[in-house]
Structures are given as structure tokens and as C-alpha cells.
Amino acid sequence: MDKSLLIETISFQPRALKLSEAKGSSGLPLVEGPLATAEIKNGNGRYYSKKIWEREIDKYMDSVRQNRAVGELDHPESTVINLKNVCHNIKDIWWDGNNIMGKIEILPTPSGNILQALMNSGITVGVSSRGMGSVKQMGETLEVQEDFELLCWDFVSTPSNPGSWMTPLHEGLTKTVSQYSKANEIIREILCAHGNCPIF
């Protein structure tokens, strides 16, 4: 079977803390929450066995230990992590039942600053795995095969995994319209500060 790019997104639901209240030894903001779930059919109709995820997490932990488990803001259609779009670094991964949990450090990069501004404004974002592999049709489910290789996790706007939205890191903003308006204002301010002012 030919391998293709497999992207799965879940809502990342961290502890209800402001980013300024949770910082690692580097002084950078940290969030914790689910990265993926095994043994369920996700929103893309795909099923990952726990055995496959356990194998890939074991391999991915080398990147975590070497402080290079980075990911991007939004998914590129690529198997290469583009460093100019990196927004976070995964500091730890562990299992909670069938859920893969992670501790994520938000980096002070342009994309990391946008991600932090969105979170601080109460915007719900998802976290999404990016990998290569093939699938096999099993009834109405596409079963991910043994050739799956995990590449990284990215932060995105639309999840495919049930229950995989990141909830706001602080209480307050409840109206969807005002949330998106505030997010656009923040993104515009960040981009305009660097001389590249887009029209929204």
C-alpha cells in the first residue's frame, strides 16, 4: 500500500490556567492536555490501534528528550517541519487510559506569539497529529496500518478527533463573534508590528 499524509486533529483541553500562571524552567508558558486518542473512530473515519500509537510514542520520545519535538501553527501539506512556522515544543508525553497526553511549551516565535494571543483571548484551538501511513477499509472505518510513522503535532483550528477542542485558558470571553474579532485584532497588531500589515 502507498503511504499518504495522515492528519488527525483533536481539541486540546488544558488545565484552566492563564498562560502566565504556568511556566516551565525556561520561563516559557506551558499547557497540558490530550494529543490523540487510540481505539476510537475519529472525525476523519480513521481508527488507530493503541499498539501503533504506543510504538510511535516510544520513538517520538527521543525527540522530546532531545528538546526538538516541535510543531507548526496550522498544517502544511508536507512531511517536513518548517522551522519558520514553529510555535511550540512538546516537553513530555504520557498515557491516560487510551488518551495520549502532552505538556507543551509555547515558543516566543512569530507563530508562537499568535498561538499564545489566541489562547489568551479565549479562542478554542485544536492539536493535530501529522504522520505518514496507509489505511485499510474495514466496514465504515479506515484502519491505520502498521506502516504509520508519526511526524509531529501541530496546532490548528478544526479537530477530527472526538472531544478534541482546546478550551480557553481563562474564563471570560463567551461570545463567538467577539472572540474572533478580538483574535483578528491581535493577529493584525502582531503582523503590523513587523511591517507586514495585512487587510482582514
Image (cartoon, rainbow, N blue to C red):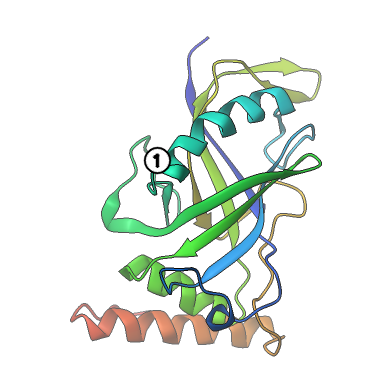
Question: Which of the 4 quarters of the picture holds residue 164?
Answer: bottom right
Which amino acid type is shown beneath numbered disc 1?
Answer: Glu
Quadrant that contains the C terminus: bottom left
Q: Position of residue 138 (x, y in %)?
A: 77, 17
Q: Position of residue 33 (x, y in %)?
A: 67, 58
Q: Residue placed at 48% from the left, 63% from the top?
A: 105
Q: Would residue 73 be visible to someone looking at this image?
A: no
- In this view, the residue in front, 75 or 105, is 105
Height in image: 185 above or below 95? below
Residue most extreme to the front = 25
Q: Position of residue 29 (x, y in %)?
A: 49, 72
Q: Residue placed at 33% from the left, 38% from the top?
A: 80
Q: Would residue 189 be visible to someone looking at this image?
A: yes
Q: Position of residue 3 (x, y in %)?
A: 48, 19
Secondary element at tag 1: loop
Height in image: 119 above or below 149? below
Question: Which of the 4 quarters of the picture holds residue 30?
Answer: bottom right
Report the number of discs: 1
Residue most extreme to the left = 195
Q: Residue placed at 43% from the left, 87% from the top?
A: 185
* Left or right: 53 as drawn, with respect to 67: right
- Label 1 crowd bin: few (<14), some (14–19), many (20+), radius 10 Å: few
Residue most extreme to the top = 1
Residue corresponding to mark 1: 77
- In this view, the residue in front, 147 or 108, is 108
Height in image: 108 above or below 129? below
Question: Which of the 4 quarters of the picture holds residue 55?
Answer: top right
Height in image: 7 above or below 197? above
